[in-house]
Image (cartoon, helix red, strand yellow):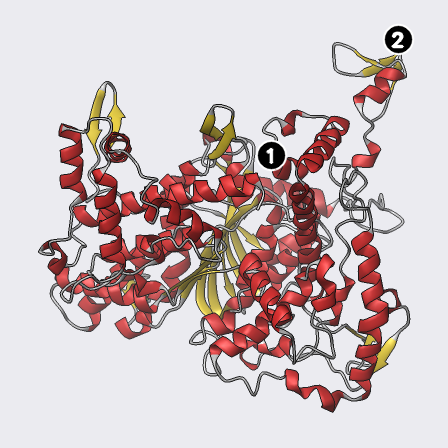
Amino acid sequence: MSARQILDVLYQAMMTLIIRLIILLYMEARHLQPHTMLDNPQYDSLEILYQELHNCAPPGCYGAWTRIKNLCTLLYKSTCALTPAYSGQLFKPGDKQSSHALSRAMAIFDVYEKLTLSDHCLKHILTALKTHQVGSAQVYIDFESLETEAIGLLYQSLLDFQLCWDEQGLSLVQRERARKGSGTFYTPSELVRIMTQRTLEPLAYIRNREGIKIPRAPEEILALKICDPACGSGFFLLATLRYLTTAMCHAYLVHRCTPLVTAEQKENIRKLVAEHCLYGVDLCPLTVELARISLWIETGVQVPLTLLDQHIKAGNALVGTWSHLYKEYPLMAWSRESADDNHTNGVYHPARKWSADLLKMRTAVIKPQFKQLLAHPLEHTDSSISGHTTNEERKRLFDRWCAIWFWPYDQLQSIPTPATFSQVTPATEQLSARLAEEIGFFHWELAFPEVFGSQQWGFDAILTNPPWEMLKPCSREFFQHYEPNYINYGKQEALAVQRRLFEQDKTIEYGWLAYQAYFKNIANWIKHIASPTGDPTAVQPDTFVLSSGLLEEPLQTNKYSEPTQNQGAEDNTQPLFSYQGTADLNNYKLFLELAHFLLKRHGQLGVLVPAAIYTDQGTVALRRLFLEQCDWRLLFGFINRRHIFAIHRSFKFAVLVLEKGSRTEQLELAFNQEKLSALEDGQPLLSLPRQQIATFSPASQTIIELQSHQDLAILEKVYAHGVLLGEQTEQSWRLQYAREFDMTNDSHLFAPIEDWQSGGYLPDIFGHALNGLATYCSP
């Protein structure tokens, strides 16, 4: 590990300690400790400890930290017959022998006796967590009434800092783009609540002829499966828990003729909803643990913290396979590009070395073995999963299949090939497991077999606010970890800094290449995962033709046929990631398509995404999907003038609510809203017929930001007597879409300022570069 990675893991351990203290404060305030623990002689109240420290915590004393460690250990595992273990990964003691870096870092605080926190330091930490400043007064926080979402908000605030080391020692430095790098921007609670209500109401209620809402039967509500595939610390899951609990209480009153739902019954209903209805996935294990604990606190029952471990899981929701894909060797994994093609400023790694190794492996090993596989397909049936009955065995095989797409370029000698896939070496198995952990392969049908089974396939609803960032490497984001001022450097200066860092530490150079490799590999995964064995031809649907660019000559056979969809997924007319278009990959687009794929027929989707979903050329395919294969009920657009999110005030985003498996006839919409309350004010929305969208924008299906019925009437008249810009006819302008230049894809077109200055160009007062009096230069 590099010095930067060590500091980052150490800071994660420090964040974990802070979160532990917050959870303990919630537990004590809401009396969630086991009753028997209160009588346990080893139990130590955090509140009592704080009062002792508040009254007297002289420098040089260290007993309080040991008491806190004992309390965490007592919660994690039972130390007496009368005290049940609460378990939970958050309170698991660190292990200095662990293969996980975070567990080893936690051992510094949990295991080593010589490294401890002083009583004086703990007093200040607990004071900061238990109080807040109101004017000149310090007010105690009431954790009994404090919203559970505060746990996630605290974690979000901790992500704004980075642990650094210099000649003066360790320090915390606030950094830019920190949360962008982690994909962590939490949705305001008010917006989460309204989106949850809008999305889940058709599942929990029906309306009678008078339009009055009537709750469905309790059994119907409890059978619902609701998922957030980018759950973070569980904001949407918390809102879903509250909404379905309320709906269940209403259902008991109506269908069970119960005059009153007691507090004890409501507590039991919350537990049932949490256990049976809620599902979540997130890439970060710590946020997954926070989601589990937040839901556990919200249920208000004294049960182990592992209550939701089987439904809230860590993993990369975008990278995983299915039984119908796994059946054949993923040949298209070999169409990936090398990460060192443009590595021109390397120190220890020569340019295109990996590229040459990749080409050699393709032609010398993969091509002849695949030819043999095509000639004798029955000899390779061992790769079938039919003989592997346990979930663990199937996961290991699924992981191996996915690992081929992300295998390190410098270890291709151990990669599973068409001939060795079913019988691999221990070294191959070990590397496959490492990749599965690092990338987070997540196989939906194995993780949630009760949702993706033979009798039922898909979730009833998906509610999410997915990450919005591009899936492309960003040197500023990477090198800022090592050089805080990197974002202020010009291109040539930045390249010089990169080379200096490579010279200082070769692990940084390898890390930069590995960082770029992930984006190369994920782009290849998204492009080919729909058909991992090759491209099916339109003329002969049962024949695969592998492009000559991949293996130097066409290979075709009628022995290989296109992998069929999972039988339970018959409503998904296209394989996953078939609607991403030609623009740069963006996480929100991937999650939109994934959410649609994971829904059952008539499943509900509620999602918050950038406004590009209804305007950009790169989202045409997704718009067509939602308009033609879904009932897109609501498009509610916001503009960030009131800083709903910590991004630019001109940024626009939108709430989408739709039902899978129907066709849009009428779309209710609003645009440029500034207040979150506008989404539930009951104000009349503009209703736009589906046919009008096709009339205004037949090629791209762009949805125009209309503000009123008068706007619509004017637009109808204009379009009735005009020529569409996108039309390709003799009367039209024959315009074609093209992307603008940007500093990432077109950096070679932007010459350094020094080059222009050496040619005599100087900036004027407007920032224009001039040579003489009137000669302007282009970038």
Residue 107 in the image: above or below residue 545: above
Q: Which residue is mark 2?
A: 773
Farthest left residue? Answer: 39
Residue 236 in the image: above or below residue 162: below
* Residue shown at 56% from the left, 39% from the top: 3
Q: Name the image quarter holding residue 18.
A: top left
Q: Which residue is mark 1?
A: 482
Residue 186 in the image: above or below residue 625: above
- Pick the front one: 313 or 573: 313
Residue 776 in the figure: left or right of residue 120: right
Which three-letter amino acid code belongs to the residue tagged 1? Tyr
Q: Secondary structure at mark 2?
A: loop
What's the distance in space between the residues labelled 1 and 2, CA to CA?
43 Å
Q: Secondary structure at mark 1?
A: loop
Image location of residue 427, percent across then percent down: 63, 69
Image location of residue 514, percent across then percent down: 67, 50
* Residue shown at 56% from the left, 87% from the top: 387
Q: Of callouts 1 and 2, which one flags the residue occurring earlier in the amino acid sequence?
A: 1
Find out whether the residues at labels 1 and 2 contact each other: C-beta distance under 8 Å.
no
Image location of residue 159, percent across then percent down: 45, 38
